[in-house]
Image (cartoon, rainbow, N blue to C red):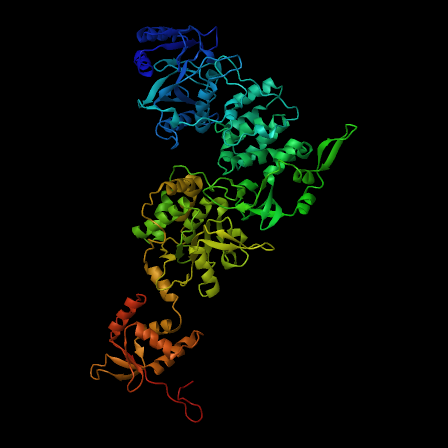
Amino acid sequence: MIADFLNKFRPGGPWLLVAMHPDKKGTPPGVTFTDAAKAEAWALEKNKTHNIYFGINPTREPINKKAEKTDIARLEWLWVDVDPRAGEDFEQERQRIRSLLNGGMPKDIPAPSLVIDSGGGYWGMWRLSEPLDIPTPASETDKPWEKAEAFNVELANRLGGDHCFNVDRIARLPGLTNWPDPKKRAKGREPSKAEVCGWNDVAYPLTAFKAAPPKAETINGGTPTASRKASPRPSVGDGTAAPSDWVPGHVAPCSTDDLREWAAANGKTIRDNTLALIATGQDPVEPTKYPSRSEPLFKVCLDLVRAGVDDAVIFRVITDPGNAIAESVREQPSWEGYAKRQIFRAWEEIGRKWWRHPKIALEYLNNMHAVLSQEGGKCRVLAWSWVPLMTDDDEDKPREEQRGRWVPLLQSFEDFQHRYCHLRVEAGTDKDGKPIEVPVGKWWLLQEARRQFDELCFHPKKPETVGRNLNLWRGWGVKPQPGDWSLMRAHVEAVLADGNAEHADYILKWAAWAVQNPHKPAEAALVFRGGKGAGKGMFARALKDLFGQHGLHIFSGDYLTGKFNAHLRDAVLVFADEAVAPDDNERSGRLQGLITEPTFVVEGKGANAVQVNNMLHVVMASNEKWVVPASSDERRYAVFNVNGNRAQDRDYFGPLAEQMANGGLAAMLHDLLEMDLDGFHPRWNIPQTDALTEQKLAGLRGVERAFLDILQTGELPVERWLDKKARTLPFVSTTRLCELVNARLRKDRGRDVTPNEVADLLKALGFEYRQYPVRGFALPTLADARAAWDRVKIPAPWDSSDRWTDLPPPKKPDADGDDGSPF
């Protein structure tokens, strides 16, 4: 078995095997073999007391020791070593890692050629179709292997791997026993067997992988190996770090073991409780002590700042995917800035004067502010204000756990300086060597390295900086992950679509189109109409939450179609809940423009109006019968009557809400992003539902509204019957019909219409116009008249009556003004 593995791993050899005692006794013996059978025999004998490893990459020549980097001839494989996270259930972690390496890889990382279960964690290995030669170092300072190691660094960063990216790395040999060391034995680890658990025999070109940037490769100051610890980072005394140490995008991990080593090398002491919080995210003595993840995160930052740990090291600790404390950080759309803010808050909490240090002051203010040189034609300083959407559940939560949104605020230079005038930075020394202190706000404005942009922009498909503009896009409200949101899917079909599978498919595809095209308007709004408590808002609120900062839930038309609408500048999903009055013609027109037009005008109070690209996706819900101003040829609204069978049903909505709060929202976003939308556009595929027809009919006004009432009642002021015996074909005077129409309109406080308007409608319906003996129209049977309406206007619900009824003319009042009525 061992010989078979070796021949498959590197056909024909050579193979360097190394034996290491679990108690780290003696110098590890190493032997280079060219005979796989002899290598197997040696390994089986040594494994009785030692752990056996094999060299992943070949050496320049046969050696009988553990290889060093200078010995390695070429890079034949890439790899990552992923171990269970401290504080988590060991077997559950092993299953997580195995699933990751066997079918759960990110899309841009190929499936491993080989997966090895080392008995603790797992190794993922990728065979290279064309090995990368590593030249012999030209000098003591030359490190030609760093280019090769950068690919392994990237894999470790992406997949949460350990510090095992060095080219001279050895791995456990499958088929042999893994003897735990004393530390692991103390934790209850038992001997286990290393084995192959996945091998697809595929070789990949190096171009299929990404290399980490140079700073990410060397940020540890050295690579930990089996025989050498990482070189400690130099201490900077007060715990500050230059901005260049804060590496965005690619940050080397820092586990609790790494932190211990750093602290020992720099004379710092880290409390065991703090290390446990980092590893598990929970208090080791009282696991339920912290109701939210942001609280232990802040506690860790406070503890590490007090312990004198470098800020760059703290940053690495709270962003290392292998540390449970980093989970809430990594889920943030802009996690680097979020991590820095936690450290800044810790400084302020313990009274540390960040503004005293120029480097830190510059980093702090650049993180919190930016100068906009031509925003709305003015030069302003940008700040962010948190606007909470407070509920009773949110009152006791830290800000990071509250619902709300960040709103950009623009201050003049003068106001910005006033904001920070009480804090002074040491800007240099005078001729006598005494420090010169100046207000930190004024100082920052004069710095060349201050953060500056031309103006704000908004584009969900582009990075934070777009040209010379600052992008307001802050990412999704949740991190998309596979999971279960089946109850919401069922809710969409059973309740929102009232059991119609085609309608449910449209609703879900509309939502998928919105998340896949956040930079384009949907051009059609989702509209849900039904009784209170039926569940109309459940799906809409979930959609809004997917967009995080860029989802709005509004309850007033002022916020959607009012004059001051700066909050819509960075909005993508708007849930208008009982917010639109369809009979307000001016605002209805604005609403239709927001749904379909490519641009709209944004205006804030006291600010210039600017035209911006429209990226709105509108969802509406109402209890009213008439919700939207839908025309007869409507293409803007997809309207659905919601099933009310589950109204106020706590046993139904409780589990649905719980599933969405526990991974369902992330799963919903994941699946919507992956949904196939070939041939679908929200405006092209609007279902012609009964609910949409009802909205079209409810929106009729004037002569159309009145004549529809006449057709529904069948009552008509007949001038004469064209078929005197059958009395099914009436002739009506245009004048008398206009009088009846206006009488009906006055009841609804509508305006009077003219005979010409009445005539135009009847002609459009195809009725015959005659001028003798009076001007009027020859109408067909009631059934044919209704059919003409359905064909030309909007299909309407009709009763079973099939005959016209003659309305007698109203009695003329007598001389005393009495028309004979009893009232």
Residue extending furthest left?
725
At which x and y percent is residue 118?
39, 18
Residue extending furthest right?
432
Q: In the drawing, does residue 651 fall left or right of residue 548?
A: left
Residue extending furthest front?
138
- Relative height, residue 262 to residue 576 (above, below): above
Which residue is rendered at x = 41% and y = 92% of the image?
814
Which residue is rendered at x = 44% and y = 29% of the image?
158
At which x and y percent is residue 582?
44, 63
- Relative height, residue 792 to residue 266 (above, below): below
Q: In the drawing, does residue 680 fall left or right of residue 280?
A: left
Q: Is residue 532 visible?
A: no
- Relative height, residue 258 to residue 542 (above, below): above
Which residue occupies the foreground of this view, 373 or 166?
373
The number of numbered discs placed on residues in the rendered structure image is 0
Q: Is residue 821 visible?
A: yes
Quarter of the image where one finds residue 265? top right
Quarter of the image where one finds residue 688? bottom left
- Relative height, residue 90 to residue 379 (above, below): above
Q: Assign the C terminus to one quadrant of the image.
A: bottom left
Which residue occupies the foreground of this view, 333 or 365?
365
Which residue occupies the foreground of this view, 740 or 617?
617
Q: Assign the N terminus to one quadrant of the image.
A: top left
At which x and y percent is residue 569?
51, 50
